[in-house]
Image (spheres, rainbow, N blue to C red):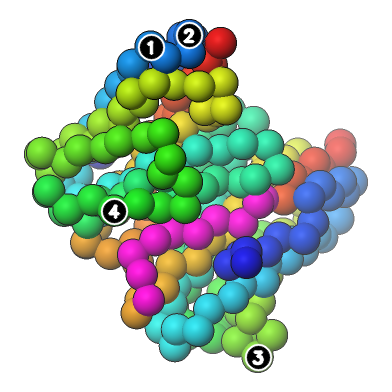
Amino acid sequence: EAQVTQNPRYLITVTGKKLTVTCSQNMNHEYMSWYRQDPGLGLRQIYYSMNVEVTDKGDVPEGYKVSRKEKRNFPLILESPSPNQTSLYFCASSFGSKPYNEQFFGPGTRLTVL
Amino acid sequence: AQKVTQAQTEISVVEKEDVTLDCVYETRDTTYYLFWYKQPPSGELVFLIRRNSFDEQNEISGRYSWNFQKSTSSFNFTITASQVVDSAVYFCALSEAATGNQFYFGTGTSLTVIP
């Protein structure tokens, strides 16, 4: 089944404790992206990747890191999480190296930083 | 500046009414892509439609229709004869061919269909 998977689905952590949210897709997509969803703000792009080893900042990259060592995986790293990073996070992927096509979304990761 | 504006934060309609969700976008590119996604209460994001800037034909899919007007930079979404299952948050989104590789969502419109 074609899908984007994210883990964990729910995470409660404390300020400053490094964490990684994994994202994997099995559709051989080039473009992958991370978004955060906050009430009243919609979804905002954090980072995106056009292909392996090619990543760039979205609108809200502060406090986040990403890497794209393999085509299928695009982990989101919070080196020192803070309470303002409490949010719902979505990973997505799409065909092609540009965001011109339908994006397939993971189920979301709800992160709470205390 | 917001690239995609969805001015309607919340809308409530009674079942079987028609409802239109507005989306206004801003871009200087001549080639761009517009999207609508649905987020039901279960939380997943469901793709509804993609249009490119060169195709201004309106689209109809069952009870759903989309009106794309470049002259007003709008890409509105109409649900005819709404049903309770249409209750969701709807997002309009934009990507631009020339000026970047980002994907921009609007802030969403929460639609409640009352039985």
Residue B45 on the magenta segment: no
Q: For the residues marked 2 and 3, what is the alpha-carbon distance in whole angstroms?
A: 50 Å
Q: For the residues marked 4 and 3, what is the alpha-carbon distance in whole angstroms?
A: 32 Å
Tell me which amino acid carries mark 4. Answer: Asp
Quarter of the N terminus of chain B within the rendering: bottom right
Residue sitting at x 43%, y 59%:
B103
Tell me which amino acid carries mark 3. Answer: Ser
Tell me which amino acid carries mark 2. Answer: Val
Residue receiving disc 4: A56
- The image position of residue B110, as x and y in percent, is 74, 45
Q: Is mark 3 on a helix, strand or loop?
A: helix
- The image position of residue B104, as x and y in percent, is 50, 59
Q: What element carries label 2?
A: loop
Q: Is mark 4 on a helix, strand or loop?
A: strand
Q: For the residues marked 2 and 4, what is the alpha-carbon distance in whole angstroms?
A: 27 Å
Residue receiving disc 1: A17
**Marks 2 & 3 on one chain:** no
Residue receiving disc 2: A14
- The image position of residue A34, as x and y in percent, is 38, 41
Q: Classify residue B69 by image quadrant.
A: bottom right
Marks 4 & 1, CB-CB < 8 Å contact: no
- The image position of residue A98, as x and y in percent, is 28, 64
Span highlighted in magenta in the image? B99-108
Q: Answer left or right for A76 relative to A107.
A: left
Q: Is mark 1 on a helix, strand or loop?
A: loop
Residue sitting at x 61%, y 57%:
B106
Q: For the residues marked 4 and 1, what is the alpha-carbon distance in whole angstroms?
A: 24 Å
User: Quick check: can you spot residue B84?
Assistant: yes
